[in-house]
Image (cartoon, rainbow, N blue to C red):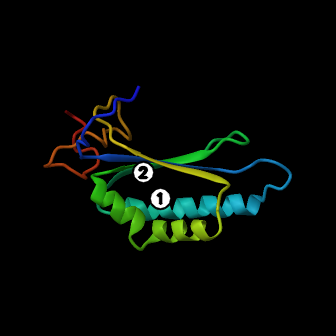
């Protein structure tokens, strides 16, 4: 399924972040709601960052499953600006480090070397230098 190249080809970067809670009688739903509200605020803030090509939140509607976000970035520099420089995401990361907002989290970054299908009518990964960072610019390729 995954082919690891010897050298990073650069280009668009995809990030998947997951978060979940330990189910049981001690689950604090106020904590879950607070986390979800913060996720929504971060997603909205990231959509305005130059170089964020696409962002989507996936919330399971089944008890006990972890939710996740997927974002597509023009390049590594854009992702680092959005995630680690002062702003909505960085403040939540710092808050989570001080007092975990979820019981478990994961953070995965990868490159898609080829894509099939579309996201909101276009392919946010397939970009050329002339259209880099412009959502849906290459949908008629």
Is residue 129 found left or right of 96 in the rendered image? left
How far apart are the two marked residues, 1 and 2, measured between alpha carbons?
Answer: 7 Å
Q: Is residue 67 above or below residue 35?
A: above
In terms of image quadrants, where is residue 61? Answer: top right
**Residue at image coords 38%, 70%:** 85
**Residue at image coords 26%, 36%:** 6
In terms of image quadrants, where is residue 128? Answer: top left
**Residue at image coords 39%, 29%:** 2
Residue 26, x across and y down, in percent: 83, 56
Q: In the rendered structure, are the residues bearing label 1 and label 2 in contact, judged by CB atoms less than 8 Å apart?
A: yes
The residue at the far left in this view is: 130
Residue 24, x across and y down, in percent: 82, 48
Sequence-earlier tag: 1 or 2 = 1
- Asked whether 121 or 80 is in front, the reply is 80
Residue under label 1: 43
SS category of the residue bearing label 1: helix
SS category of the residue bearing label 2: strand
Residue 105, x across and y down, in percent: 58, 52
Q: Residues within 10 Å of mark 1 (few under 14, many from 20)?
A: many
Residue under label 2: 55
The answer to whether residue 51 is visible is no
Q: Tell me, for residue 72, which label it has, or none.
A: none
- Asked whether 125 or 20 is in front, the reply is 20
The residue at the far front in this view is: 6
Residue 34, x across and y down, in percent: 66, 64
The answer to whether residue 66 is visible is yes
């Amino acid at each position: 399924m995954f082919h690891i190249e010897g050298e990073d080809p650069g280009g668009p970067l995809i990030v998947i972040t997951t978060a979940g809670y330990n189910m049981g009688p001690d689950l604090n739903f106020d904590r879950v709601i607070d986390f979800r509200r913060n996720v929504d605020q971060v997603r909205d803030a990231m959509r305005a960052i130059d170089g964020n090509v696409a962002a989507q939140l996936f919330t399971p509607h089944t008890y006990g499953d972890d939710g996740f976000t997927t974002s597509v970035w023009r390049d590594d520099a854009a992702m680092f600006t959005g995630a680690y420089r002062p702003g909505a995401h960085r403040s939540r990361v710092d808050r989570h480090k001080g007092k975990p907002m979820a019981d478990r989290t994961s953070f995965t970054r990868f490159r898609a070397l080829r894509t099939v299908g579309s996201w909101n009518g276009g392919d946010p990964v397939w970009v050329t230098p002339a259209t880099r960072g412009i959502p849906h610019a290459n949908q008629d390729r």
